[in-house]
Amino acid sequence: MAFYQYMRSQGHERSKATSTATSKATYPAKSADEDSNPLEVGTRGHVSLCASEDASATARQFQREFYVVYALAVAADWLQGPHMYAMYRFEKDLPEKLVAVLYATGFVSAALSAPFAGELADRYGRRLACQVYCVTYTLACLSMISNNLMVLLLGRLFGGVSTTLLFSVFEAWMITDYHRRGLEDEAGGGDTLPLGTVFAHLTTISSTVAVLSGVLSDMLVTYLASRVWPFMASIVCCCLAWCLMRVNWRENYGVRSTNTYALTDIGSGIATIMKNRQILSLGIASCVFESSMYLFVFFWSAALEHARKASVLQDIGMDAGAQVDTRLPFGLIFSSFMCAMLTGSSVFSLSLASSGPARDMAASMLMLVLVMTSIGFSGSALLEHSEKHVFWAMCLIEACAGAYFPSISMLKSKAVEDGNRGRIYSLLRVPTNIIVVLAHAMDEEGAAHRNHVFLSLAGSPLSECKQTRGDWTLAIF
């Protein structure tokens, strides 16, 4: 190395001497084109082109390997989602109080597993954690075959763990693999595949898969005459996703320390959240919005049935005690909701392409989403006697969800380091699950309670918007 530095310095001195002698001569200076070596210029351009092609090929491989698995993973969730409440309430003829207990069991499981799921994923492998999702979700779906209450409760326990894994470790694995492949050029600003675009793609994939899943699940229920078949189709998706992960994905880890216990690392993660205003603000925003969406998922079918009954009775001029057919095509309605969600994702993508810095745009979009979600929940409660208006208010809520998920994912990807990503993401889900469990504990029969919940949900995003605006201004803009 010393010899190399010496020869380089000697070459530099000779270059200076030659340059000085040339400048004293009367010859005109050469142009840049004359000094350039055509062969060198051509080689440099060829290398640049090859590098660009290699980066594009890497981006395509990354998208192919992750997007397909992600589509299968969310398909497993979306296929049975529209039919879970109906399966418990109508197929198994369980009272609504017991259905609420089953739902609450899933959220308790998610809340209890969240602190450990991310920590264990960071320590033992995020790909392994994604594969565990496939196993636990398969067990949750198999439980729907049984009418035994203990088996159903056990299935909801597995379902809660699966939900935590789906919404934390998949994204943690993806972002780390994205950085490993060098797809983000922070210095040059010319990302081969911008991370914001990836998040928009994921929401688009999720929405598209949800639309198709809603149609397919309705077909399975119609032609096979049982609501259990969408759950069996979910098992097929889980098996395919597990195999593709095993073949195509490379394992990645977070910060692994052999000298600390899991509880110590969890405490460290909590301290990181509390000390970082940016992460704390995003955690509060995600807690408010996502808990609202989980409660919406529980109530939307009953709310639409009530609106259908009220509309029919109003049209035919009968009193409220009359019996009318309120059956609804839940799969088709769910697909409509997902189309609205896809619209929200498209709005995010268009805003990302036409606005300034991605982080600033995502923060502004998140503010808008919180306000519009409040309007949607207010409409669902105040217009309860109009089936059409309730439906469109719910579509607005779903459109907000479509813009919310890529926005919050973009902001969290910038705020959280790769080494702690799984741990932090899982911890941020704990308050969400606690709120949902408490809400289900106070669940009651009837439209009055449901409307009170919707109005409460309408107020919480607005208060959060007012509360966190200062935090985002300080931490993000």
Image (tube, helix red, strand yellow):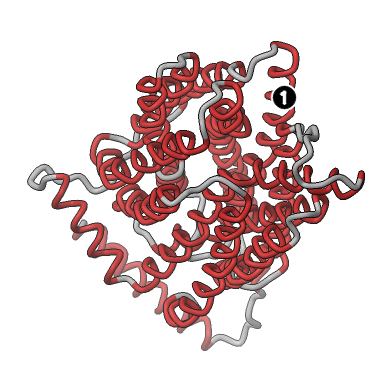
Q: Farthest residue toward the left?
A: 259
Residue 379 in the image: x percent, y percent?
A: 72, 62
In the foreground, 303 or 205: 303
Residue closer to the observer: 265 or 298: 298
Disc 1 packing (10 Å; few <14; some 14–19; many ≥20): many
Say which residue appears at 51% left-offset and 27% top-offset. 94
Vertical arrangement, residue 338 with respect to residue 215, above or below: below
Which residue appears farthest toward the top when viewing the image? 224
* Left or right placement of residue 472 versus residue 376 in this view: left
Residue corresponding to mark 1: 218
Q: Position of residue 238 (x, y in %)?
A: 50, 22
Residue 273, image quadrant: bottom left
Amino acid carrying label 1: it is Asp
- Relative side of 177 to 423, left or right: right
Q: Nearer the viewer, residue 114 or 363?
A: 114
Find numbered disc 1 in the image and state the secondary structure of the residue it sits on: helix
The residue depicted at 44 percent of the width and 19 percent of the height is 143
Between 298 and 126, the one lying in front of the other is: 298
